Image (tube, grey):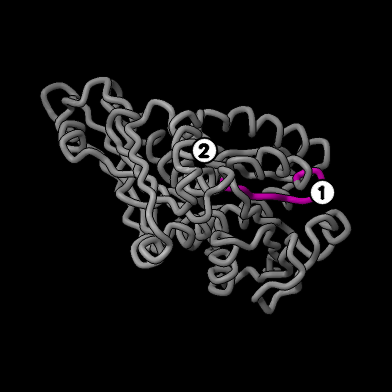
Amino acid sequence: MATIRAAIVGYGNLGKSVEKLLAKQPDMELAAVFSRRETLETDAPVLPVDDFAEHTDKFDVALLCLGSATDIPEQAVGFARHANTVDTYDNHRDVPRHRADMDAAAKEAGTVAIVATGWDPGMFSLNRTIADALLPGNEQHTFWGPGLSQGHSNAVRRIDGVQKAVQYTLPDEDSLELARQRKAGDLDGKSAHVRKCFIVADEADHERIEHEIRTMEDYFVGYQVEVTFVDEATFDAEHTGMPHGGHVITAADTGGFNHTIEYILKLERNPDFTAASQIAYARAAHRLREQGVSGAFTVLEVAPYLLSPTPLDELIARDV
């Protein structure tokens, strides 16, 4: 089996995690890192991101390790016009639009683009769909956290005047238990969570920054939001970890019998798990392209066996 050559586009926390975990794959290798910076702390070849189209012969699939706030919406289509791509776009409401744009670009170019990989969207998306199919008439609820949200933290850091920032999402424990008992009713994600922001910024900017956070569509509007400004020493001591996780709870009555499917993730380091998912779907993107497929796909559309380095016959013998 030929080794799949992967390229990383963007070298922040996610890109570094992808590099680390690619080294553990039996069938993949890192071919290059594309970045705006000329010098990075990596042994891989570093190439200018502006020259991406000129180097597509060096890799089979590009992992777009870019932010969801602006980078992926503005740049991902351009990359899909030249190579197979996998991204971790996490703006749930905008995924259909993003998929459609990527689909048009990929079909025109004859490439494969797998969008919105990660854990949510991603692994949680799969579980919601499967559990809903298995238990008709169910109550289903998704809870995020406790943990740090990369996408929301990145969105806050992009606000002018923000020096450092993290955003934690915390589920309400009473709401979790109500969901398990099919008593949560129409509880929605916004009312079942608190979003806590910890920010380093000059005092003169505090009021404006907090206003921009609270009025940020798709990220904070409608949620319980707490904004706390801290000094840099406190931030460095207390807010440099990257935990996350959550629950998808699906409960139903099948005629006098209660059934609950609960999918739980407990992640010590969010970028590592997101990278692990993105790498698996990068393998799938390459395989789909080898099958002559083109266009954009979500995790719901990709057969599970395409994610694994283990041959299909062995998977069937082992896991079916």
Is 13 positioned to the left or the right of 106 in the image?
left
**Residue 313, which numbered label?**
none
Residue type pointed to by label 2: Leu
Rendered residue at 48%/41% (across/down): 121
Q: How would you rate the neighbour count of disc 2 (Cα within 10 Å): few for under 14, some for 14-19, many for 20 or more?
A: some
Please tell me in which quadrant of the rendered image residue 191 appears: top left
Residue 310 on image: x %, y %: 52, 64
Asked if the magenta segment contains residue 261, the reply would be: no
* Secondary structure state at the residue bearing disc 2: helix
- In percent of the image, x 39 and y 63: which residue is there? 241
Quick check: marks 2 and 1 in contact, CB under 8 Å?
no
Apparent side of residue 261 relative to residue 24 in the rendered image (left or right): left
Q: Is residue 111 left or right of residue 316?
A: right
Tell me: residue 236, above or below residue 161: below
Taking depth in this image into account, of 13 and 295 the one nearest to the observer is 13
Image location (x, y in percent) of residue 231: 40, 59
Label 2 belongs to which residue? 300
The structure residue drawn at horizontal position 14% and vertical position 31%, both measured from the top left corner, is 181
SS under mark 1: loop
For residue 199, say whether it is visible. yes
In this view, the residue farthest toward the front is: 204
In the rendered image, residue 173, in percent from the top left (x then y), is placed at 18, 40
Q: Residue at x 76, y 32 (%)?
A: 104
Quarter holding residue 73: top right
Which residue is label 1 attached to?
82
- The mark closer to the camera, 2 or 1, is 1
The magenta stretch is: 80-88
Determine crowd level at label 1: few under 14, some 14-19, many 20+ residues with C-alpha closer than 10 A. Answer: many
Is 86 magenta? The answer is: yes
